[in-house]
Image: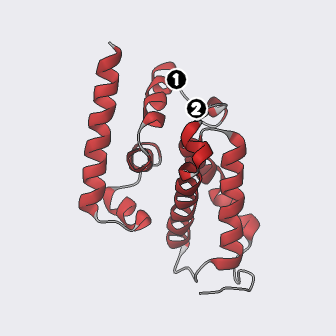
Amino acid sequence: MQSDSLRPGGDIADAYEIYGRMLFKIAMVHLGNKEDAEEAMQETFIKLLYKSPEFKDQGHEKAWLIRVITNHCKNMQGSLWRRRVMKVEEINEYFEFSSPDRALMDHVLKLPFKYKTVIHLYYYEDYSVREISEILQISESAIKMRLNRGRKLLKMDLEGEE
């Protein structure tokens, strides 16, 4: 693992080009506004530049970046100010929604962090349970449980609207 040296063998601009849009969308889902999502992106790419391990392949790099941005968003969510104020703005600019999909995304955004993460990765980024387990470094059974509980919370929330 590198610590104080720049990232060898890879161009940060290439990584940004390949993963930037996906990582920004993940941050928007978790944080709800452009400025915080941009801050999470910046911190993630700084870590990529200075603290990334040697990657086996592109999939390993992608999983590492998702884990880093998800953890950073979780830390940002944990701050006292963020717990009191949750803004969701400008999300339509970054996701292509039909009206019913937008309504569903509003409900997904209200989920607790651990459910929102797996729901987003599974349904919006098309990762399998196994892949999410590897990315988040938790067991497949924990992913399945979070998906199940997240779906139940969504169902209760949606049924409560009717």
In the rendered view, would you say 74 is above or below 51? above
Q: Which kind of residue does numbered mark 2 sit on?
A: Glu
Give the Cα separation between the discs numbered 1 and 2.
Answer: 7 Å
Q: Three-letter amino acid code at disc 1?
A: Ser
Q: Position of residue 154 (x, y in %)?
A: 33, 32
Disc number at residue 98?
1
Badge 1 element: loop
> Which image quarter holds the N terminus?
bottom right
* Front position in the image: 151 or 61: 151
Residue at the extreme top of the image, as rendered: 162
Task: Return the x and y of residue 160 as percentages of the image width and height.
Answer: 31, 19
Would you name the residue on which mark 2 appears?
96
Sort mark 2 into few (<14), some (14-19) or many (20+) by Cα contacts within 10 Å. Answer: few
Q: Residue at x 32, y 62 (%)?
A: 130
Q: Secondary structure at mark 2?
A: loop
Report the side of 68 relative to 161 (left or right). right
Residue 136's x, y, as percent?
42, 63
* Coordinates of residue 56 in the picture (x, y in percent): 52, 81
Looking at this view, is 76 or 151 the one in front?
Answer: 76
User: Within 10 Å of the Cα at label 1, are there few (<14), some (14-19), or many (20+) other Cα atoms?
Assistant: few
- 68 in relation to 115, above or below: below
- To which quarter of the image does residue 6 belong? bottom right
